Image (cartoon, helix red, strand yellow):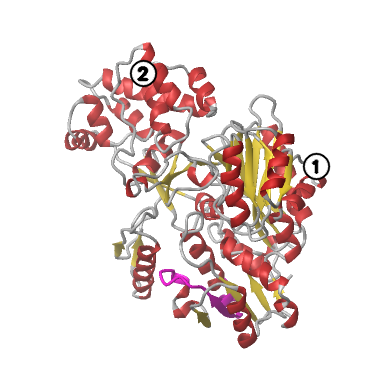
Amino acid sequence: MPRRTDLNSVLVIGSGPIVIGQAAEFDYSGTQALRVLKEEGVRVVLVNSNPATIMTDPEFADATYIEPITPEVIAKIIEKERPDAILPTLGGQTALNAAIALDKQGTLREYDVELIGANIEAINLGEDREAFKGVVERAGGESARSIIVHSMPEALEAAKELGYPMVVRPSFTMGGLGSGMAYNEEDLYRIAGAGIQYSPTSEVLLEESILGWKEYELEMMRDKNDNVVVVCSIENFDPVGVHTGDSITVAPALTLTDREYQKLRDIAINVIREVGVDTGGCNIQFAVDPKTGRIIVIEMNPRVSRSSALASKATGFPIAKIATKLSLGYTLDEIPNDITQKTPASFEPTLDYVVVKVPRFAFEKFPAADPTLTTTMKSVGEAMALGRNFTEALQKAMRSLEQKGASFSFTKQQLNAEELDALIEKTKIPTTQRIYQVQQALLAGASIAQVFEATKIDPWFLDQLVLLNEVAGIVRENRDNLTPEILQLAKRHGFSDPQIAEIIGSSEDVVRGVRHALGIRPVFKTVDTCAAEFEAFTPYHYSSYDSEDEVAHHETPSIMILGSGPNRIGQGIEFDYSCVHASLVLRSLGTRRLW
């Protein structure tokens, strides 16, 4: 079906200032939305208060309001601009909460403005903890045992029924704000009290503990004809108890059986249908008991989420762009895939590589802060890497953090039994250093079973860390005779030249010289959304020590743009803004751009 002809003007609500849990990914999503709307001939009105975002540049919207994102301000903009619809699903929780407030105060009804992307009923069903529990039940899924409370006396009464520990989850908040794990009454007072304050509806969900379960999420899209696709499956390296934004995450999910994946997929499709998201995307999170396989639906975001940007980059499937087209009335089978130019958006992406995202923390700026990772997000940025296997992608992502000590060290510590037990004991507490402690414990002789018992990190991931230690051991044993095969093996598992130099007791320059002399250099592979079933026309690449280079030959003069890496305190999206403008200028000059 062609796009709706009754939508001539759309108001897009941005996400406002960068905060933990809501950062550059919403600038990315919002900018895509503005471009799609303008391409479709729609008059675009934008409200956003962040000066560093590319979307607030004058050329992206027909009218841009640099104003606070409050219902009162937006109501005045609606009165002046008279848009036909509001698109609130690309501005994070800030935009969604503003849309809900506009509906409650009657502004949408007064000016006959429609919400597109997700209606109020869908937003409330996805965000309201008690309502969502009913959705999950009707969809054939299961929720954790829980009780909704609105005050501390109610919370204390609920604790008698649920027992400790319990999870505290406020409604309508972002980045896990106000959430946490209450192990006793003192914790409950502190966490639930804050959650009641942070929730705009003073509503907090207390639920049974599922600590140690495996955590997954599915990025979904649905159109008005009930076509549904799973864009990407994402798995957390850390078990339940660490916020997804603070956990290393992997795409596609690697430790699910096919039967488990199909069950998650069926539940997710039923949930998105039951909630009623029919013109856009959503994110659904699950927990799976590693002992019994019991599946719990944790929550749903009826909007483009922080994970949507990761899923888009991981698969090459532009979620925000397609969500915007769906909100205008198109269906998935009508939207072409930009990368293949042959397949429609109704084709689910297929990955023949592994994607790893590693969070970046800034505790060095706040030495008194507690580095323990909980269900409240604490990371300030993230780095993503692609590789032909998990170990390669993991090591590349860790180097991309641009922090001293971010890469694994393979210098073996000589620990006695007591010291090893103490190190394993440390891994029980999730902190920014846990993955390094786990790797060192395994290197020092701890078994996978011992570390799993302490951390509940899936044994497959632990086995991959053992594999890295084994490869390092092979390199060390052959340090006087580094053959091409051994060097190639190390590089295919993501070892950098400095790491290899440390292992063999040499210098980075020497290792690089030997590698170049042996002709061991990286090639560049292409992200194509279809595991090479169709030719890719979009030049989206990642490096690997594989055999075939997939970068097409070109004669056009090229200029390389060096980006700023992951967000951190003091270096955020303003540098993304600068790089985007540099790229736009070079494109206008007919120059080929490399990022």
Indicate the quadrant where residue 188 lies: top right
Indicate the quadrant where residue 583 lies: bottom left
Q: Tell me if residue 54 is in the magenta stretch.
A: yes
Q: What label does residue 140 carry, if any?
A: 1
Pick the front one: 395 or 40:
395
Q: Residue at x 54, y 44 (%)?
A: 244
Q: Residue at x 52, y 62 (%)?
A: 26
Along the horizontal axis of the image, is 106 left or right of 255? right
Indicate the quadrant where residue 478 lies: top left
- Callouts 2 and 1 close, C-beta under 8 Å: no
CA gap, disc 2 to disc 1?
46 Å
Q: Quadrant of the N terminus?
A: bottom right
Instruction: Indicate the secondary structure of the residue bearing disc 2.
Output: loop
Q: Which residues are magenta?
A: 36-55
Whether residue 519 can be seen here: no
Question: Where is residue 170 drawn, in percent x and y?
Answer: 63, 51
What amino acid type should be assigned to the residue bearing mark 1? Answer: Gly
Q: Quadrant of the C terminus?
A: bottom left
Q: Is residue 385 above or below residue 123?
A: above
Instruction: Indicate the secondary structure of the residue bearing disc 1.
Output: loop
In the picture as drawn, the residue positioned furthest to the right comes out as: 138
Q: Is residue 399 above or below residue 5?
A: above
Residue ID for mark 2 = 444
